[in-house]
Amino acid sequence: MAANEYQFDEQWFIPGYGPRQVYEVLYNATILPEWWSGVYLEAIPLRAYERPIVGAKVRARARGFLPYTLSFELEALTLEHSRLVEVKATGDFNGIWRAELVRENGGTRVLISWRVTVHKPIIRYLSPLLKPLFAWNHCWTTPRGERGLLRYLDNLHQRPSLSTSRLSMAL
């Protein structure tokens, strides 16, 4: 694997929500800044669609803890209702993000696979030395996505915000 290639395999657990409810949020890239706030700074649709479809694209900007942003486009590759969301990213990095949804213990397990090659110059050139730091920066974003998704679902379904306590108990 080249120094500027990254591979992340992660799992989220979203208690109290089935795969259908989780899918309804994950498949719509335009709302990423609403639930993954502080990480996704914008997600602008490149064409208007009534509902997300395969081929739909958004232009996105995101950040981690480190002081840089990444700009990229996301294109929906696979949208299997209540089961699978797969998107292709191109721009400061190229790769595939895949989320498989599995019903588990009164909630949904989200199995995430993220394979990217980073082209942003600062990361590409410094990856041979700082790859662990850049990987940590990505890992800093992950729990924010998991917590944000649960909080977003709680708000959407008008449930008391027990996200933090539910998440803590699940860990």
Image (cartoon, rainbow, N blue to C red):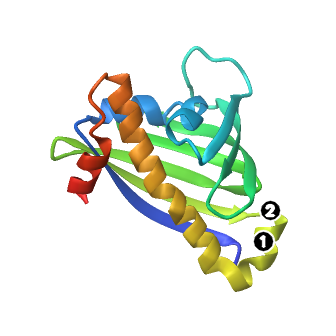
Q: Residue at x 80, y 62 (%)?
A: 120
Q: Nearer the viewer, residue 139 or 101?
A: 139
Q: Residue at x 73, y 47 (%)?
A: 72
Vertically, is 166 above or below 155?
below
Q: Nearer the viewer, residue 156 or 18?
A: 156
Amino acid type, residue under disc 1 in the picture: Arg
In terms of secondary structure, where does tag 1 sit?
Answer: helix
Residue 96: % across, % down = 59, 53
Tell which residue pokes out farthest to the left in this image: 105
Residue 122: % across, % down = 81, 69
Find residue 10 and report its image quarter.
bottom left
Answer with left or right where residue 150 lies relative to residue 96: left
In terms of secondary structure, where does tag 2 sit?
Answer: loop
Tell which residue pokes out farthest to the right in this image: 121
Neighbourhood count class around disc 2 (C-alpha, 10 Å): few under 14, some 14–19, many 20 upward = some
Find residue 161 and report its image quarter.
top left
Contact between labelled residues 2 and 1, with CB atoms less than 8 Å apart? yes
Q: Would you name the residue on which mark 2 appears?
A: 120
The CA distance from mark 1 to mark 2 is 6 Å
Q: Residue at x 68, y 81 (%)?
A: 130
Q: Which mark is residue 124?
A: 1
Vertically, is 87 above or below 30?
below
Answer with left or right where residue 33 lies relative to residue 111: right
Amino acid type, residue under disc 2 in the picture: Lys
Neighbourhood count class around disc 1 (C-alpha, 10 Å): few under 14, some 14–19, many 20 upward = some
Q: Is residue 99 visible?
A: no
Residue 49: % across, % down = 63, 17
Vertically, is 138 above or below 154?
below
Q: Nearer the viewer, residue 13 or 46?
A: 13
Find residue 150 and report its image quarter.
top left
